[in-house]
Image (cartoon, rainbow, N blue to C red):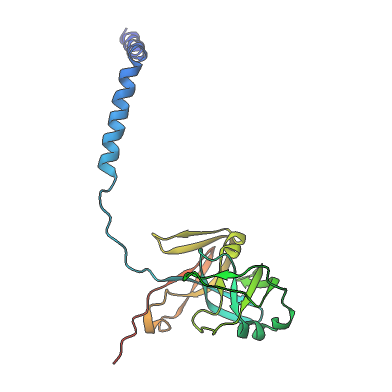
Amino acid sequence: MDSMSEAFDQMQMVKDVLANSDKVSEVLQESTHQFNLLTSPTFLPKVKDQGKFTLPCTLGHLEIDNALVDSGASINLISLSMAEKLGIAGTLQRPTTSIMFGDATSKSPLGVFKNYHLKIGECIIQTDLTVMEMEEEKDLPLLLGTPFLSTVGASIDFHKQEVILHKVVKERVDKEPRVGKDKDERGPRIEKPRLERARVEKPRSDRKS
């Protein structure tokens, strides 16, 4: 009898809900609204400069420890001196577009080298390199833009400060994230095969003695 009575009560409850569906919907919407008010922040403090994302790779015969990952760049960029080191300076294709800079100025690149092999671990990635005559920066020898990031299936998590290359899985030796002038003091660590992650280089604090 108890089970029959309980089943009857449940059926009656369902009927009441169906008969008052509009009121039930209003109550649910109000509850959801109150929940959102409780969970949504009303103020977020600004985050300090988190530095830049860099990635170790091999370009031709050159080992590059800190290629810059830039999701705002529509090309992969190297300097003329870097192209000469790679032996591709004399075999460039004519550029079809100019490069627009952040200060609204533009400059035509010297040329493009198609399908150059960039290597991360054991994975070879075909990469188009745009060559421009500019002063080579030792700290930023290679800029990897959206063409490369799309090819490797990259996702950038600014909160966790990491870039994950979902299509690249390998075993690698990587240094700890480098900070300031003491970036080379920490030794390497061996990691098991996993999704390739870029490092985050913190802003440098160059103090005069």
Where is residue 193? Give x, y as percent.
55, 65
Asked whether residue 173 is in view, the answer is yes
Where is residue 174? Give x, y as percent.
50, 74
**Residue drawn at x 72%, y 74% as measured from the top left:** 93
**Residue drawn at x 25%, y 52% as measured from the top left:** 43
**Residue drawn at x 61%, y 83% as measured from the top left:** 82
**Residue drawn at x 41%, y 64% as measured from the top left:** 161
In the picture provided, is 65 more to the left or to the right than 23?
right
Q: Quadrant of residue 141?
A: bottom right
Where is residue 37? Give x, y as percent.
26, 40
Q: Nearer the viewer, residue 82 or 152?
A: 82
In this rendering, the answer to whether 85 lies above or below 193 is below
In the picture provided, is 63 more to the left or to the right than 162?
right
Q: Nearer the viewer, residue 3 or 192?
A: 192
Q: How many marks?
A: 0
Asked whether residue 125 is in view, the answer is no
The residue furthest front is 105
Where is residue 20? Give x, y as percent.
32, 14
Q: Quadrant of residue 185?
A: bottom left
The residue furthest bottom is 209
Q: Nearer the viewer, residue 203 or 90?
A: 90
The quadrant of the image that shows the C terminus is bottom left
The residue furthest right is 91
The quadrant of the image that shows the N terminus is top left
